[in-house]
Amino acid sequence: MNQSAIDRGYAHAKTVFAEWGVDSDAAIGKLKAVPISLHCWQGDDVNGFETAGAPGGGLAVTGNYPGRARNGDELRSDLELAYKLLPGKHRLNLHALYAETSGKKVERDAQGPEHFARWMDWAKSIGIGVDFNPSYFAHPKANDGFTLAHRDDGIRKFWIDHGKCSRRIARAFAEKLGTPCVNNVWIPDGYKDTPVDRKSPRERLEKSLDAVFADKIDESLVLDAVEGKLFGIGSESYVVGSHEFYLGYAIRRNKLVCLDAGHYHPTEQMSDKISSVFTSLGRILLHVSRGVRWDSDHVVTLNDDLLAIAQELVRGDYLDRTHIGLDYFDASINRVAAWVIGTRNMLKALLIALLEPIQQLKDAEESGDYTKRLAMQEEIRTLPVGAVWDHYCAQSGVATGLDWLDEVRRYEKSVLSIR
């Protein structure tokens, strides 16, 4: 789309939103301040740099689209293209299994900041922040489905030490990059079939988490989060780290709780949990995904579930207290495009929410005029949000419409196709 058409469209949209009492320039200004943390594992199908095996630990990646990143340089190159195609300044979400050890065998309980030095230098050079995750999967000591809740003291200690290492690495990222690092703990621990003892694994997990978090680290540097799940592959009947377990733990220990859009029953809405959790916690972490019948981690689309998440964050004035990351992996399509599609949809959903006449909607609700509330909710669905989005992209020097896909195709032809 040419610039004059974008300008004309935005001039009209700005007038329309003003008639609803909404300042579209202010909405764009707020959106600019929201970083999305792009997950590195979309770029290489959660393989990491330790082995060439399957990810395991309840994770399953399907598809064989050509061009998967095979090392840090390729993954960083792919990410750079994705960032180039997104308006705003965003972040990276990095897992511990992406350590770069110069070909040396370094166990996860011995990882240090030096094994992520290239990630740090790269992030510094392009001006982005980094979030971190210990990797409690795809490892021989996780083969039986248990890590921090393992009954074996030695295996449990290995994973505790890995968690401690990860927090030190997260601190190094924060110090190097000048922005806090969210360090998120997710474990696959659980049983495929119905257990007799649900209590003991949870008691072990609580003690393990206390040990992981024992070292005091300034919260201006590292924000620790814990992530629950309803079930996973191999833990269909019982997950030690359930939502209820982690919510209670986060409240008692002053941690962030991570809400993942794919980690609940298909009839549950993650958006409905946001305001409830914020009554007890100061900050939260969101992992935005799209489940299809289960935690299948499809690329985020602009559907009602995503809109509901964005609306809760904006209507509740939670944006400054929420860390938003993406978490999906699709190997059936171009992996760079998967990042771009998902992130742009997350940003579009936030923009739609920021362009709502929230006070008018609240006034109708508080006066008991639910007819007006519903009529307004439906009418604003067709307001010219697209013109505001195009203006934001053009203003940011980013391709509008599907023009970004042309750049991905050129990159696919010149780079991805020869891997």
Image: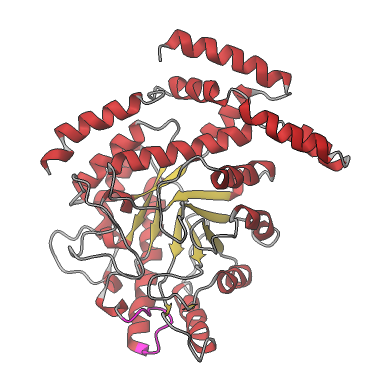
Residue 91: in magenta span: no
Question: Which quadrant of the structure image shows residue 109?
Answer: bottom left
Name the image colouring: secondary structure
Q: Is residue 254 among the parts visible in the rendering?
A: yes
Please indicate whether residue 270 sits to the left or right of residue 416 in the image.
right
Question: Which quadrant of the structure image shows residue 165?
Answer: bottom left
**Between residues 229 and 301, which one lies in front from this camera angle?**
301
Residue 17 vs 95, above or below: the answer is above
Residue 194 vs 315, above or below: the answer is below
**Between residues 58 and 22, which one lies in front from this camera angle?**
58
Residue 281 in picture, x, y percent from top left: 64, 60
Residue 283 in picture, x, y percent from top left: 60, 55
Residue at 57% from the left image edge and 44% from the top image edge: 304
Residue 237 in picture, x, y percent from top left: 47, 78
Tell me the quadrant of the picture where the C terminus can be found: top left
Tell me the quadrant of the picture where the N terminus can be found: top left
Residue at 20% from the left image edge and 69% from the top image edge: 106
Secondary structure that dominates the magenta span: loop
Q: How many marks?
A: 0
- From which residue to which does the magenta span run? 144-153
Question: Which quadrant of the structure image shows residue 408?
Answer: top left
Q: Is residue 33 among the parts visible in the rendering?
A: no
Residue 370 in picture, x, y percent from top left: 82, 40
Residue at 36% from the left image edge and 42% from the top image edge: 339
Residue 341 vs 210, above or below: the answer is above
Please indicate whether residue 5 sits to the left or right of residue 412 in the image.
right
